[in-house]
Image (cartoon, grey):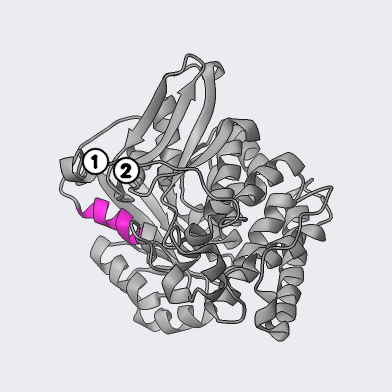
Amino acid sequence: MTSILLLGSTGSIGTQTLDLVREGGSGLTVSGLAARASWEDLLDQAREFSVTHLALTDPEAAALARPRLPAGTHLHEGPEAMQELILACDFDTAVHGVVGCAGLPASLEVLRRGKRLALANKESLVVAGEHLMAVARDFGAEIIPVDSEHSAVLQCLRGEDRARLKRVLLTCSGGPLRLTPSESLRHVKPEEALQHPNWSMGPRITIGSASLMNKALEVIELHHLFGLSPEQIEVVIHPQSIVHSMVEFVDGAVVAHMGLPDMRGPIHHALHSPDRPPSPVRGFDLQAFAKLEFEAPDPVRFPALKLGHECIRAGGDSACVLNAADEVAVQAFLDGKISFTDMNQVHRTALDQRQGDASSIEALMAADLRARAHAQKAVQNLATSGPASSGPAAPEPANHP
């Protein structure tokens, strides 16, 4: 039996992980569950899977849950509840589905325990990839990506000589706005940008899929996970989301990982790798696989995409700053404060004011806070300037992203 600790149990990754646990003969048990504020769902999960160690990071939600806890259940509460849960539980693998930079401390705590980290929280690697990979090495821990694209690359590279790798072709669907005229993007409403054609995901990732900022962040993830240079990573639009990524070798061979768009696949792989036990995920489907298309992304339509490569080249705190600015920008767009294209200006404003220090986790957290403040000010300026602000992204500075 494999015991899992589930961080973000009430979100998309968490609920799909529990679907796998429910499968007969899954060989999976749950030792702990963590959520931010969805206390009722958390308690339902605890009862169903007989879990006695829980965490809620929202104090108000914890206060509501406390008098309703099943007998013998311990609840960790507050901002450090996930770290406390990680230390209190006995588990083999932590599935980390929390969204945002707030998930970084939990990633570090899992790795410091020398455990396997099934990582869907891309922000941990984007913000502090060098530090995270170093901690994994120092403590004998393992990071297995849960993003479908990074899981695909990992599987394509299994058993291969990394020195023979030429490049990785990172696929994306192009999102719900792939065919929207560029001049109409400034008028896109949140509900339009949230209508992903293939995947069911949380709002931040879905908006990032519409702008391709999500893919820019995945470029940074790939760099840290596999030691790739910017020149070895190319993004390709693949509307069907059947080919989850490809690797090309120096002899011209291209190996692709294919499957229906179902996040249970990469979650299942992360839980059992390198083994391949049976799963409920459907394999080859003639109708779904019948037509596979690829195209280059339009840099005018998707100006955010280039920021991933730029941040790898710039190094320092650039990726941390980009992530913080994007969290602010996406929320402002969802709240109706800025337009879809205004998000590009928020990213650029924060990047222009970064200081560069990435010497420690503490320095990165300080950079994160500064970037959020700069991004919030940019949102305020854009909101007061009105529709005229929603034009093309500002020009790039000469020295850094």
Residue 273 visible within the image: no
Image: magenta residue range: 14-22
Q: Label 1 crowding class (10 Å Cα cut-off): few <14, some 14-19, many 20+?
A: some
Kindly indicate the quadrant of the structure image that contains residue 387.
bottom right
**Disc 2 vs disc 1: Cβ atoms closer than 8 Å?**
yes
The amino acid type, in three-letter code, at marker 1 is Phe
Residue sitting nearer the eye, 356 or 138: 356
Point out residue 307 in the picture as x, y percentages from the top left corner.
66, 50
Point out residue 182 in the picture as x, y percentages from the top left corner.
54, 63
- How far is disc 2 from disc 1 in space, using C-alphas? 7 Å
Q: Quadrant of the N terminus?
A: top left
Please report the residue visible at 32 percent of the width from the left and 61 percent of the height from the top.
15
Please report the residue visible at 26 percent of the width from the left and 61 percent of the height from the top.
49
- Give the left or right position of residue 31, taking residue 399 as reference: left
Is residue 209 positioned above or below 332 on the image? above
Residue sitting nearer the eye, 217 or 188: 188
Q: Is residue 234 magenta?
A: no
- Give the left or right position of residue 321, taking residue 162 as reference: right
Is residue 302 positioned above or below 181 on the image? above
Circle 2 residue: 242
Circle 1 residue: 289
